[in-house]
Amino acid sequence: MNDAVLIVNAGSSSIKFALFDACDDRKPRAIVRGEVDGIGHAPRLRITGAHGATAADRVLGGAQTHEEILAEVLRWIDEAFPNTRIVAAGHRVVHGGERFFAPTLVSPEVRAALELLIPLAPLHQPHNLAAIDAFGRLHPDLPQIACFDTAFHAQESWEATAFALPRELRDQGIRRYGFHGLSYEYIASALPEHLGERADGRTVVAHLGAGASMCAMRRRRSVATTMGFTALDGLPMGTRSGTLDAGVLLYLLQQGWTAERLADMLWRHCGLLGLSEISDDARTLLASDDARAARALEFFSYRAARELGSLAIVLGGLDSLVFTAGIGEHAPMIRARICELASSLGIALNAQANACDATRISDASSRVTVLVLPTDEEIVVARQTLEATAACYPR
């Protein structure tokens, strides 16, 4: 019987998952990866094998809830791999607050503590917990490990994590946490392969997707990041506002807006969608000839370049810039515009390499090495799950 861990990244309308061989804690091997999207409407299961071949593609007609979906996924795994035993489940959990800075075995007490953080990550935390609850009912004896997006930034300095608020609020946990940490941890682990000795230099990683942030690293550790107390801060995103003058919110409250109306607007109706009034998807905007689409993308690029400059100052200069995630990996036009705006930092792109989504897209004359690297949050969760499970349940 072969041991494996199942990695789950649950959202509101989709669940991404991957099955990893558990034989090597440091280099787990992906057996299959999959996604169920359309949850609540017409959920569709898609699974690919280790080499990218389609292993399953079908509609899950009767399954609608997270529990029903995960039951279908587990049933498929049992049928496809009868000699494989799942020994643990690892979950991406977006917010760990001030308490959780390492992979953590989920207990009822831990589960309750994570629920208190839902207001800080309302688009993610409830669905992360729904998957944990579903597993708890389907396999009550299976160890579940929570792996946190905030953990990678835990060692940042006081200055990098503070707000200019009364100390009593800091004492209540109101501070900058940062997110996308699982993605940043993967990129940090991949840098030596592409940069050699320069991997420990001054690097900014741009995780640009429907959720977007940037992280300044020195010695492959987080020094500063653009997101803060919640995942609303920093760059504009698909539907989220990014950095906003708090006075705007005070004004709207004084005009009679409720907190609920404000939250709905800030999380679901701002960003690229609010700017363009067309779509929250950069691919749609890039394909559009509407001036509003162009303006939204120009604003996104401007804000990214401005944040890049700020992070470079924190680092004392810039040696490398890495683009990752959906927009970062697949939108040459946006990468080019960000780099053009930040050219004074010593960035020069090779236009042909950029257009082809090559790994290294900087020109030979560029002082800054610019890379495009696909992220892999699942393998980071797999590593952390295996390490935490081994610590709790030595084999």
Image (tube, grey):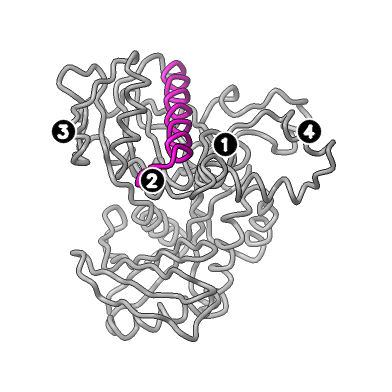
Residue 177 in the image, given as x and y percentages of width and height = 58, 37
Under tag 3, what secondary structure? helix
- Disc sitting over residue 288 in the figure: 2
Quadrant location, the C terminus: bottom left
SS at circle 4: helix
In the picture of the structure, the residue carrying the numbered disc 3 is: 352
**Residue 13 in view here:** yes
Q: Nearer the viewer, mark 2 or mark 1?
A: 2
Q: Position of residue 380 (x, y in %)?
A: 37, 51
Label disc, if present, on residue 242 of the rendered structure = 1
* Residue 125 image position (x, y, % from top left): 59, 56
Vertical side of 307 occupied by 124: above or below:
below
Distance from disc 4 to disc 3, alpha carbons, whole Å, reads 47 Å
Which dot marks residue 258?
none
Sequence-wise first label, 4 or 1: 1
Task: Specify whether residue 99 is in view.
Answer: no
Amino acid at circle 1:
Gly
Residue type pointed to by label 4: Leu
Q: CA distance from mark 4 to mark 1?
A: 17 Å
Q: Going from the N terminus, do you reach mark 4 or mark 2 first?
A: 4
Q: Which residues are magenta?
A: 286-314
Magenta stretch contains residue 292: yes
- Mark 4 and mark 3 lie on one chain; the one further toward the N terminus is 4
Residue at point 30%, 21% (across, down): 319
Mark 3 → mark 2, Cα distance in angstroms: 23 Å
Q: CA distance from mark 4 to mark 2?
A: 35 Å
Dots 4, 1 in contact, CB < 8 A:
no
Mark 3 touching mark 1, by CB under 8 A? no
243 or 68: nearer the eye?
Answer: 243
